[in-house]
Amino acid sequence: MNPFRKKTKQLTREQLRRRMLILLGLAGILCVFALVAPYLTPNDPNLPNAAYMNAAPCKEFPLGADRYGRCVLSRVMIGARTSIFSAVALVFLTFVAGSLLGMLSGWYGGVLDAVIMRVADIFLAFPQMVLAIAVAGVLGGSLLNAMIALGIAGWTIYARLARVHTMALKNEPFILAARMNGSSGLSILLRHILPNMIGPLLVNAVTQIGTTMIGIAGLSFLGLGVVPPNAEWGSMINEARAYVQLAPWSVFVPAVAVIITVMVFNYLGDAVRDYSDVSEAK
């Protein structure tokens, strides 16, 4: 057993709750920072300055400048909005679409179930990032196309989970009572089944934010995501990688931003899952 997981299981419910709230607060701070970043940048993030090309950190550019003389700090701050909110938006959309398809599949069964699950199996047969690269390569480079490429297979995990829970719940006595009361299938799904499985689905969604953020940054790094001069951490690393020896800050600063942000959301996902497991056990 993983020693970290073993230690986590020894924590009390209150300790797990406190850890979850702390990480939720850190994630909230990152989101608020990304929201207000355009009003806090020390320089114009897209303004080139030939006099400061690859300039080292100085008073005017606290974290240095890139090969075009643009402020690295300002671009990282602006890129936070794109990197964080695009990942959150994509997870939300795949969560809604996948959960809806999974509930319909588990509730109605038959041909609809077979079609939805076989389509999901086809997408799951390919590594998500490889499929995303192929789709983004066909669609062309842009943030929207990168989100579409990752979302094509991203819904499957929620669909399968929602289907399993729906099939387990639809024969419960309270569901049968709702049927006898004349409630429609859609009403039962939204009013009775969804509230009873929203917890596991949300836990899964939170754990996917960090992974999705890496996926968007990876596609942007390959030139299949955000198109320069728009600032995004993956595209910033790609632009600066040829100058890593001359201006390492242009690569390291956005890379550190990716690492810290993904770690916060990954730890938040783990904390939510651990707290949820303990709550269910009680």
Image (cartoon, grey):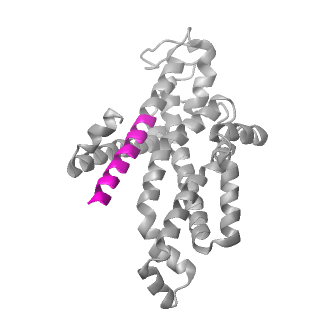
Q: Is residue 247 magenta?
A: no
Could you tell me residue 177's position as x and y percent?
A: 44, 86
Determine which quarter of the picture holds residue 36: top left
> Which residue shows up at 60% across the image and 19% down it?
240
Q: Is residue 229 above or below residue 67?
A: below
Question: Can residue 278 be seen at all in this image of the molecule?
Answer: yes
Considering the image in quadrants, where does the N terminus appear? top left
- The one nearer the camera, 121 or 226, is 121
- The one nearer the camera, 242 or 268, is 268
How many numbered circles are shown? 0
> Which residue shows up at 56% across the image and 78% down it?
186
Report the side of 27 relative to 186 (left or right): left
Could you tell me residue 276's position as x and y percent?
A: 34, 55
Report the side of 215 relative to 282 (left or right): right
Q: Is residue 281 magenta?
A: yes
Considering the image in quadrants, where does the C terminus appear? bottom left
- The one nearer the camera, 92 or 173, is 173
Question: Can residue 49 be seen at all in this image of the molecule?
Answer: no
Could you tell me residue 137's position as x and y percent?
A: 75, 37
Report the side of 191 relative to 119 (left or right): left
Q: Main secondary structure of the magenta part?
A: helix
Q: Farthest front residue? A: 1
Q: Is residue 57 above or below residue 232?
A: above
Magenta residues?
262-282
- The one nearer the camera, 172 or 99, is 172
Report the side of 31 relative to 105 (left or right): left
> Which residue shows up at 44% across the image and 65% down it?
197
> Which residue shows up at 56% across the image and 8% down it?
245
